[in-house]
Structure formats: structure tokens, C-alpha cells
Image (cartoon, helix red, strand yellow):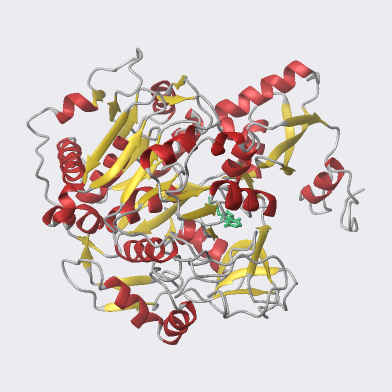
Amino acid sequence: MSDEFSPPTSEWYYPANGVVENAHVKDYKAIYKESMDDLEAFWAKRAETLDWYEPWDTVLDDSNAPFFKWFSGGKTNVTLNALDRHVKTWRRNKIAMIWEGEPGDKVSLSYWRLWQEVNKFGNVLRSMGVKKGDTVTIYMGRIPELAIAMLACAKIGAVHSVVYGGFSDQALADRIEDAQSRVLVTADGAWLRGNIVHLKDVVDEAVHRSPVVETIIVVRRTGHDIRMEQGRDYWYHDLMNLPIASPICETEVMDAEDPLFILYTSGTTGKPKGVLHTQGGYQVYISTTLEWVFDIKDEDRWWCAADPGWITGHSYIVYAPLILGATGFMYEGAPNFPYPNRWWKMIEEYGITILYTAPTAIRGLMRFGDAWPKRHNLSSLRLLGTVGEPINPEAWRWYHTVIGKEQCPIMDTWWQTETGGFMITPVPSFGLKPGSATRPFPGIDADIVDEDGNTVPPGEDGFLVIKRPWPGMLRTVYGDPERYKEQYWSKYQKQGWYLAGDSARFDDDNYIWVIGRIDDVLKVSGYRLGTAEVESGLVSHPAVAESAVIGIPDEVKGNVIYAYCILVAGAEPSEDLKDELKNHVRHEVGPIAVPAKIEFVETLPKTRSGKIMRRVLKARAQGLPEGDLSTLER
Ligand code: WTA
């Protein structure tokens, strides 16, 4: 609410006329209070807005904490709400998804058409032997078939594991192996900056390393020559033309707590974590958050510019917009291709009303200057959003002034792969401060605490915690329940709080400012990456004995990677070796993990117990004081 917090202590922005009057949430304070007074009643009321095959017995089952269950006994399927119910109403004729390829090709799918495509592909998967509970790995670019494949899995009760199309064959192989997927869906290639990304080649290499895959379904996107292995590889379009691909596909009736997907994300070890989300609570959480934060209406054209290969795309490109019956836009390629006006041109052409993206993308486009967006009429926009890392006030102001013409509030949403949906975020009626994600969403009991669990006073840093469960939360780490307990629930085990892994502070108005990670997780161009993943990529090269990786602030990317390597005896340091190591990381982990700088060193600063002091490396790299060195081994 623009008027409920104490008078401005820093820079404030209030919503323009018309934003508040029509918003879904007019009285945040009352709704928040209601949610905290009776959490279960609050979420039950939200769940009632969706269709269920059978109602739940218990809203929240905390008998086996931290393995919480939501809407136990309820029977549902996310596609019942995202597709099946819409084709029975006027929405069957509404556009569900508008898509533009990087070369300029266009597709739009009505709810009816999308529903049919999903049904057909669901039948194809079933005919390939995919059953309820099986995992299917999906590895492709930003094309409609990616959404169709995810929805088809959900419809037949299979668990999808989408691997971001920028990952290397080794990273893909590890994820296939962990999920034990026998079926993989991919494309021949993807368009990026006018070039082909050779997805199928990466898949061939990954499957060679991880032979558990028996069937590969390939969407023809780029049309270049690829190798198809008989008996293993099938063209998507061939399968979709078979009689088996009937447009009627029975939706699997799922328990609310049955798994919907696994999404691998980076943690503090080299091994990626498979974050597991389920069918019931996730739907309730993501549809409520999208509706209230971005105030989605039937007239809107919503553009979440993330990649479906990370959680933002899962929740807010694919599932939540469809559950709400909204019209979403998806674009395949690079924001500056062929010119830096590509995004602004599409906003004008399609009449996009809400744009949701990452600070790194905003900074990247800001660099090209105001002239590019100014060539276009962006007046269709009414709301903007950001996610992925703290947004620097300069980028915020540019987004607000040059893109939003000072008419569009910016929803700075803090959340995580683990949380499923927005957690700390304004709603459109809030007064905003550039760089603050503001307040907890209704139903979210967030706090910032010290080591002992005491709430820290305004201005002091502490650990961001969530004190009560929420329906969109992860349920476990796939195949590793111990890691789930240890990572998120052990620090405040006594209190039963979720540790987000971020540090944050309150200001005098009780607004939350997220500062950054407390662990060795980096954000590079908005992507989450563990230092350990890059380090293990480096030491897998025969010349490297040991390595340490740090993030150094960068104007556009948020962070870039600096790597320090100790070479094995006999290996000669050279510029060529640096290039070779960069290529090696590209191949082992993926292009996003390639260090901006590699330095060969004789020793690394370590504590006496042998832990690398990345803080010291960071300070040295930036020419800052090295701080407390009492634990440094000399
Ligand atoms: C960071 C992305 C500040 C944070 C949805 C979190 C943010 C991590 C914000 C999760 C924001 C995300 N302000 N920091 N608005 N949004 N983060 O799993 O460090 O890729 O813990 O999920 O991104 O990254 P993930």
C-alpha cells in the first residue's frame, strides 16, 4: 500500500493512476494479516479457486516435518487446470501462447490447439512406454514444443526434468543419470544470434556417457543435417502424425503430493541438486502469486522473458499463465538480434502489457542506449518485473523511466528454484524503492535473523528465513532426502525454519533488501552456478591440480568468474593453456561457467582446516583490504 508505511526515508516511487484501483490486491495489509492468522484457511481458500477431481483431507500435514505435505488426499493434475478446464469454456478460442522464433517465424496457439498438441504428445509418450512416475529429460531451446513436452509429461503423470539448453554434454549426462530417464526429448538445434546451437550433437555425446536413455524424440527446428540413430531416435513430427497420436488423451488422476518435476540447480557441492516439486500445492502457489503480483487479466499479454529451462520459465511461462487462462508470449533468441531493438519491437508489435525479466538483461539492453527503445511505442506496457539477483538502482531507474515511461510499477520478486514461486515481492499498489523486493507475499512468514534466531534490527545483515511452510515449497532433493534436511532445515532445526541461503536486511520501513548468497553460489547473468561446479570442471583437466573460483562484480552480468589454478608438476603455465582450460570448462559445464579470467598460482589462501578462503581471493582481485586473516594458514 502506498500509504501504509512510514514517510519516505529514501527514494520512493508510487504507483501511477489507475494501477491500484483495478488491482487484484487492494489491501495487502488486511490480506497478509488474514493469512498469518490462519495459514491453512488462507491456502484452502486459494486452492478452492482451482478444479480438483477429489477434495483434500488435510490442508497442511506437518507430522513428518520438514517433509511437509499440502492438500493431502486431494486428487488433481496441473493440466486439468492449465488446459482441460479451459477447453470447456469460451477460452478454447483464446490465444494461450504467442511465439516468435529468432529468424522471425511466428506461431500462435489457442487453448484448444495447445490442448490437442499436448494430448497428442501425451499419447506419443505413452506409446513409447512412459508411465506415471517415470522421468523424462527435456533438452531444447525456447520453442513451443518445450512447453508441449512439459505439459504432456504432466498430463500422463510422468515427471519432467528440463535441462537448460546451454548446458554441456557432461552436465546433461549427469542430470540424465541422476533422474534415470529412459526417454529424452530434444531438438536438432536452436537459433541464437543467427547461429545454430547444435543441441542434438550435445545429446548424442551425453547419451554416450549416460546410456540409460533408450529413446530420443527430436523436434525439427533448425533443419540442419543431424545424425539419427535407427531404433533410438525418432522425429517428433513423424510420431505426431501416427494414428497413435490421437488428440484425445486421458489425464492421469494424480495425488496432490505426486511429483510434477525435478529441476536441477546449483548448490555448494559439485553435484547438482534435483529440486522436486509436486502436483497440488505448486499449482495453488504459482497461480496465486502470478495473479496477485502481476495482476493478470484476460486482456493482458504477459511476457516472461526467462528461459523455460529454469524455474522462472517452469512456473511463469508454462504453468501459472495457463492455469490463469492468460495469453503468454515466448521468444526464442537473443535480445539484441539482429539489432538491440528486438525486444522493444516485439513489445510494440504484440502489444505486450507486462514484461518480466532479469536485471542482467535490463543492464545488457541499457548499454545500447535510449535511442533503441525510444524508436518504439511501448505504451501497451502497464507493469514490469525483475527476478534473479538484486537490481542496482541505476538499472531500476532506466527500466522505470525509459521502458515504463514512469507509468509502470516494477515488481522486484525475490524467490528461488526451491520456493516454486515469488516469496518477497511487492504487489502493484506498493510504494517502491529501487533495489528492494519489499515485503513477504501473503502466506509467507519471512524474517531476517541472527545466528541465534533473533530478528535483526533494521540496517543490520542477517539470514533470510521462512518460518512456516508454503504450498509451493520443494518437497525434497531428488534421491537425497538427507541433503534436503541438511541444506535447508538444519541451521534452525530447533525452530523448524527454512534457511534460504541469502543474507538480507530490513530498512526503517520494514522493507526487505536482499544482499546476496551466504554460500558459494554465484549468479552469472542471472544463472545460478556453484563455485564447486566450475572448480571440479577445471580440476578434471589433467594440467590442473587444484583450483578456486570466485565471483567478481560486473556491470552487465552481475558477476563474472575469476579462477585461480595450481598446476600439476611439469605443466607449463601459458596463455594457450588458459584458452584450453576455458574450452574445457565450456565442454564440461557449459558456456555460462567459462571464467572471464584465469590466473596460475603457486598456493591458495586456506584456513588451517584446509578450506579455501575465497573472501581473501576476492579482496585481492578487487584491491580491497583482506579483512580478518586470523584463520589463514601461513
Ligand atoms: C537470488 C531464481 C535479489 C537469490 C528465481 C536467490 C534475488 C537466488 C532475487 C535463487 C531478487 C532471486 N533480488 N536476489 N529479486 N531473485 N535472487 O534458484 O540469491 O535461480 O537465493 O531462482 O537468486 O536463484 P534461482
Asked where in the image residue 130 lies, by quadrant, the reply is top left
Q: Nearer the viewer, residue 92 or 525?
A: 92
Q: Nearer the viewer, residue 209 or 85?
A: 85
* Quadrant of ligand 1 in image: bottom right
Observer able to see residue 252: no
**Residue at horizontal 50 percent and vertical 61 percent from the top:** 484
Observer able to see residue 391: yes
Residue 442 image point, x, y percent: 45, 74
> Relative to 76, does residue 156 appear above or below in the rendering?
above
Q: How many marks?
A: 0
Residue 17 placement, left or right of 614: left
**Extreme residue toward the left, this view:** 243
> Relative to 241, does residue 524 appear above or below in the rendering?
below
Q: Nearer the viewer, residue 25 or 236?
A: 25
Residue 86 image point, x, y percent: 18, 55
Residue 60 placement, left or right of 361: left
Q: Nearer the viewer, residue 308 or 356?
A: 356
**Extreme residue toward the top, this view:** 225
> Relative to 12, does residue 35 appear above or below in the rendering?
below
Residue 12 image point, x, y percent: 65, 67
Asked where in the image residue 280 lies, by quadrant, the reply is bottom left
**Residue at horizontal 29 percent and vertical 71 percent from the top:** 47
Residue 148 image point, x, y percent: 27, 41
